[in-house]
Image (cartoon, rainbow, N blue to C red):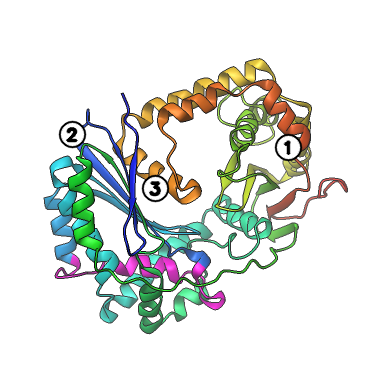
Amino acid sequence: MAQKARWHTFDNGLTLVAEPMPWLQSAAFTFLTPAGCCHDPVDRIGLSALVCEMTLRGSGTRDSRAFIRDLENLGVESSESASVSHATFCGATLADNLTAALGIYVDLLRSAHLPEDQLEAGRMVTLQELQGVEDDPSQKLMNELRRHHYPDPWGRPTQGERAALESVAIDQIRRYYRQQYRPNGTILGVAGRFDWEPLKDAVGELIGDWPTAEPDTLRDRPPGARVAHVHHDSNQTQIGIAYRSIPYRDPDYFLAWGAAGVLSGGMSSRLFTEVRERRGLCYTVYASHHTLRDHAAVLCYAGTSADRAQETLDVTLHELTQLADGIRDDELDRLKARIKSGLIMQQESSSSRSGAVARDWYHLETVRSLDELAAEVDALTCQRINGYLTDHPPGDFTVVTLGPGELALPQDAV
């Protein structure tokens, strides 16, 4: 049976959140550090991604090769990424190796070398990641959709912008690292087999004298135009639609999440059934609920041939607006079964839970256990979701298209 998470905030502001999973032989950790692209200077979007890459090139007493070697010797499966809000560093290993692995990553967060002679190599890695997005029309489209829907800096592309990445200097990287890689605002999520008191003491020893830094002040700026087209020579058209929703911390979040789940997430979902299966309009269509701390949206995507793009847009918008009429019992039953399958799989993965408890703390300053999540799902009813949809009908859409030609939009759609 799952045990409840425990948490502790140290004097310098770092919060440790840990959920025991004693039936496992592994332990996993997730560091959320307040160094996402929302903190990038306006003319240096992508700085956070480049700094994240540069932290891997040696820290503490280790150069880049020793960093990799020591992680491999501990059997750590690791990953890192820069998101809108955070630089995220994750690892999973045998439970007996947890403290040693945490020590390596605390060095990364506190004392990265950021070597100037490796700046160009780091820059090339981030530019290649950016090029991967440029070469993938669906990713490029969804980046543009978020930019046009959310206020800046919350809709920024996490991969950055080419001109900014090409012009970043080493002193800017080091300044950003000193400012944003700080204990106050950092969350460490741990899940798996561990003992709480020894874990808390070990983390305290590792980070206790890590000095704080003053956080910067973020100000929302207006997003891009609500309707936009990106010209792209192709026989395909990518369609992105977004509408406002409520974030994870809102008491009605699971109602909004449930409503979006009816739209997508299986071959019986509304968008798949109507847009792809019955009409054969597109090769891919989906919708997902996307949440930041203070903003949220339902983001929809359809990829289709250029000659069927207008009909695809019209039918997709119709399905979204029709959601306000309510959902059915059979749709809710399928949604609950799918969600519960996901919760059961989380019980088997320390990596999934370490990330989940860290994100819960960021959004809620508490942790929902898997049992509490299951109870939230069980409590969903058509009546409750339909009441939410009556008060929050999909509308005021942001629409971005990418392809050879612009599409026409109904006047009442945006």
Q: Are marks 1 and 2 in contact (CB under 8 Å)?
A: no
According to the image, label 2 marks what residue?
A: 25
Is 43 on the left or on the right of 315, as rendered? left
Q: How far apart are the two marked residues, 1 and 3, measured between alpha carbons?
A: 35 Å
Is 310 on the left or on the right of 259, as rendered? right
The first of marks 1 and 2 along the sequence is: 2
Which residue is found at the position 30% from the left and 68% from the top?
Answer: 55
Q: Is residue 248 above or below residue 11?
A: above
Q: Is residue 76 visible?
A: no
Which image quadrant is residue 279 in?
top right
Q: Is residue 365 above or below residue 261?
A: below
Magenta stretch? 39-64
Which residue is found at the position 73% from the left and 51% from the top?
Answer: 399
Amino acid on which the number 2 mark rests in the picture: Gln
According to the image, label 3 marks what residue?
A: 358
Q: Is residue 12 above or below residue 403?
A: below
Q: Is residue 3 magenta?
A: no
Q: Position of residue 48 (x, y in %)?
A: 43, 68
Q: Residue 58 shows which numbered tag?
A: none
Which image quadrant is residue 181 in?
bottom left
Q: Which label sits in the foreground, 1 or 3?
A: 3
According to the image, label 1 marks what residue?
A: 316
Taking depth in this image into account, of 293 and 135 the one nearest to the observer is: 293
Taking depth in this image into account, of 299 and 290 the one nearest to the observer is: 290
Tell me the quadrant of the picture where the N terminus can be found: top left
